[in-house]
Every structure is written in structure tokens, then in C-alpha cells.
Amino acid sequence: MRELIGTDFIITVPNFIMLMGASFMAGFLDSIAGGGGLISLPAYTLTGIPMHFVYGCNKFSAACGTTIATLRFWKHKMLDIQVGILAAIGAFAASALAAKVVLYLSDSTLKTIMFIILPIAGVVTVLNKNMGEENHSDSYSTKKKVALALLIGGLIGFYDGLVGPGTGTFALMAFCFIMKYDLRTASGNAKCLNLASNYAALAVFLLEGTVYFKIAIPAAVFGVAGNFLGAGFAIKKGAKAIKFMLMVVIVLLFIKMGADFLL
């Protein structure tokens, strides 16, 4: 079996093919409800790539895919660009703060936080049958929108720096519940917020030299394809489809955090 050789690691052709498929599925899921890393990161890990390259390559693919998904939501007017940018600014600043706070918390504390939050999020989503069917964000004044966008960006950014998994998913829910956006626009706003954290992290990985482009670029191509199709799916199918995918991500997150908590 032929093998692809990296700087200090080897990846077999079957593993490479598996990774490309996982990158596509991760992009598709992430563009709709967040949580793509739940698919892509385990796939990278299974190839045997060193962990610092896992995160670098994954972030490269995620950043490329999120860019395409954001542009597609914007093109179809399913994104409030002002709110998205303000939220991204808040997320960037809060994420940096959380990165310092996390140093003082134990792993068990962080896992307990997630283990409590996820069931609550799932129950709220299931019980709220009309969640995200209509866009009522215009009921807020411009000043209130600015304040809420910065607040959501700050809270989600802090969560991203503190815990990580499910950032896009919780951003979507925050825009939907707090700012009363429909699910399609909330999903677009969440993508814009994610751009800030993705590119900030990618810049660090690039500077550290942990992005292996012979793997990252093909993975990004498949990830972009998944994001493009996923965004189109969300735009066409609407709130019910997004809500279903949102529950899928919440269940996956709960399983992952439960396994981490128990092991």
C-alpha cells in the first residue's frame, strides 16, 4: 500500500481517503449547525498525524470552509453582516480572556460544565417547537442589537476559549433565542462569528509551522465543498432541517463530553 509521507509522519492512502470524506461531512454539518470538529478531529487523529498537525490542518480546512459558508449565507441575504461582525469582535476579545481563565480550572471542572449545559440545550430545543421559524430581530432597536451582538460574541468567544467544542452550535442558538433571528439567519450570523476565532487560531498555527499543506489543502477542498452544499441545504430547507441537524450536533456533543467525563 502506497503511503503519503509528511515532515515527520506517514499517512496511508486509505487513511487519506477517509480523511477527505470526513472533511466533507464535517464541512456539511458545520455550515448548518456547527460541530464539524466532532467529525474531522477524530478522523485526523485516526490517521496517526501528530496532534499539533491535527489542529493546524483542521483549522486550515475549517477556516476555508467557514469563509465559503459565510459568503453563501450573505449572498442569499441570510446574514445580518453588521451583527455578525460585532459578534466576531466580541468573540475575539473574550476568547483571549478565556484562554487565561482556563489555566485556573481543572479538566474535570470544564467537563462538568459541558455535561450540565448540553442536556439543557437539547431540552430547550426540543420543547421550543416554533424555534427559529420567523425572524423577529427587527423588534430590537439598533443600539440594542449592537449591545446584544457584542454580548453574544463575548459569551460565545469566552466559551470557545474556555471549552471549545460546539462553539458554532451555541452561537446559532444564541442568535435565535436572544436576538430572535430565524434559524437560517442565525446560522449565517454564527458563521461570521466563527470566522474570527478560526482565522485567529489559524494565524497562530501558520506561524508555528503546524499546517502541513499537502494534507491541509486537499482537506480544505473537500471541506469547502461540504460547507457550500450544507449552506445551500440550510437555505433551501429552512428551520426544520436546521433544527434537526442542531439536535444531531447536541447529541454528538453530549456523547463526546460524556465519554470524556467518564474516562
Image (cartoon, grey):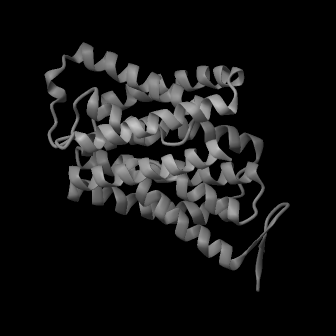
Q: Residue at x 27, y 48 (%)?
A: 75
* Number of callouts: 0
Left or right? Give the position of 144 relative to 162.
left
Q: Which residue of the protein is positioned furthest toward the top in this rendering?
A: 143
Question: 137 above or below 6?
Answer: above
Question: 197 above or below 149?
Answer: below
Image quadrant of residue 220? bottom right
Left or right? Give the position of 214 relative to 237.
right
Percent from the top left, x then y, of residue 68?
41, 52
Q: Is residue 222 visible?
A: yes
Q: Residue at x 14, y 39 (%)?
A: 134
Percent from the top left, x then y, of residue 93?
54, 21
Percent from the top left, x then y, of residue 224?
46, 59
Pick the front one: 26 or 244:
244
Question: 17 above or below 142?
Answer: below
Q: Residue at x 66, y 78 (%)?
A: 14
Percent from the top left, x then y, of residue 44?
66, 60
Pick the front one: 230 or 35:
35
Left or right? Give the position of 171 relative to 1.
left
Quarter in which the N terminus is drawn: bottom right
Pick the front one: 165 or 129:
129
Q: Is residue 32 visible?
A: no
Q: Which residue of the protein is positioned furthest toward the right in this rendering?
A: 8
Image quadrant of residue 95? top right
Q: Which residue of the protein is positioned furthest toward the bottom in this rendering?
A: 1
